Amino acid sequence: MSNATNPKYAIGIDLGGTSTKFGIVDKDGHILKQDRIPTDSEKPIDFFIQQLHEKLQPMIDEVGGKEAFIGIGMGAPNGNLYTGNIEYAANLHWKGIVPVAHLLNEKFGLKAMLTNDANAAAMGEMMYGAAKGMKHFITITLGTGVGSGIVIDGRMVVGNDGFAGELGHTIVRHNGRLHKLTGSRGCLEVYASATGVRQTAIEFMEKHPEKPSLLRNFPQDSLTSEIVYECALKGDVIAKDVFDFTGEILGEALANFVMFSSPQAIILFGGLTKAGSYIMNPTKEAMEKNLYQVFKNKVQLVFSNLKESDAAILGASALVL
């Protein structure tokens, strides 16, 4: 880093299954500018990098050009901190190993680092959010999939190969629902994600044809977890049952995670947390019910207090700041 240029900004990128959010972050953790693009992983990775460049370059120029930047940090599904590659991501259409950090470095002419998206969000929570000052916590992202970041003794758990902490892919129901992208059955992600909530709603309507429901007014292919929440708010019984079922499975899984790492807190964020108490209450009840006595009533279960996606943008930028 040259003292003459004194770079003071970083770019934080949160690459999600549906959309990619990014922002310019200063050393105090303020997001000065931010935007988003569709992830569109059905198209080649080069197309995605180009789309990102078209949006980001004017923002970079506005604050002084690339000389004002330390680098780029990105959180992405199956992002490997050690290699800078996205490797075999279940929720993206890019197959195999994708050298994203290298491609970003080439395109922008800046140092680029990559980590798992949920780990990036956990770093954001630890530096600026609900986990500030904590040394032991778990973050769970409830979005298109279920991501997780585990911090023990103030250090992110990344494991031997950079992929530790894939709690969304732990099996929670023997021979359960099929995960179409991985081939596994009964993992947490197929139940506790926004996608899982939609699938549960469809299954519950088919299982109980005699029950009236506002959800029946929507074509299956346009049904979303947001619609399920809106119907629950209006008192729809099936919609409320969907959240009770989802919370029960999530709470059981969280109990297992608590007994593994004994965190001070579990922080939930992502689109599904917009359901508020509809998801929080059954989750907390199931977690406490399934905890071994020495762990009961010790672990805070809270929603992130950072704006949605801000945690991941801030955490990603912290890779280079």
Image (cartoon, rainbow, N blue to C red):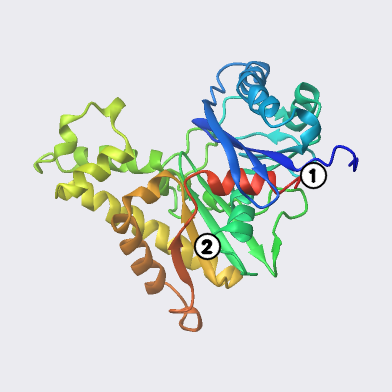
Question: Residue 62, image x and y in percent?
Answer: 66, 27
Question: Residue 131, image x and y in percent?
Answer: 57, 64
Residue topped by disc 2: 130
Residue topped by disc 1: 82
Question: Residue 170, image x and y in percent?
Answer: 54, 53
Amino acid marked by disc 1? Tyr
221 or 56: nearer the eye?
A: 56
Image vertical order of residue 156 relative to residue 220, above or below: below
Residue in view at x 9 percent, y 41 percent: 212
Identify the mark nearer the N-term, 1 or 2: 1
13 or 85: nearer the eye?
A: 13
Image vertical order of residue 194 relative to residue 155, above or below: above
Amino acid marked by disc 2? Ala
Residue in view at x 68 percent, y 45 percent: 26
Residue in view at x 29 percent, y 27 percent: 222
Residue in view at x 85 percent, y 37 percent: 5
Quick one: SS at disc 1?
loop
Image vertical order of residue 30 relative to residue 253, above or below: above
Answer with left or right where residue 67 lies relative to residue 268. Answer: right
Q: Which mark is residue 140?
A: none
Q: Quadrant of residue 69?
A: top right
Tell which tag, 1 or 2, sits nearer the viewer. 2
Q: Are marks 1 and 2 in contact (CB under 8 Å)?
A: no
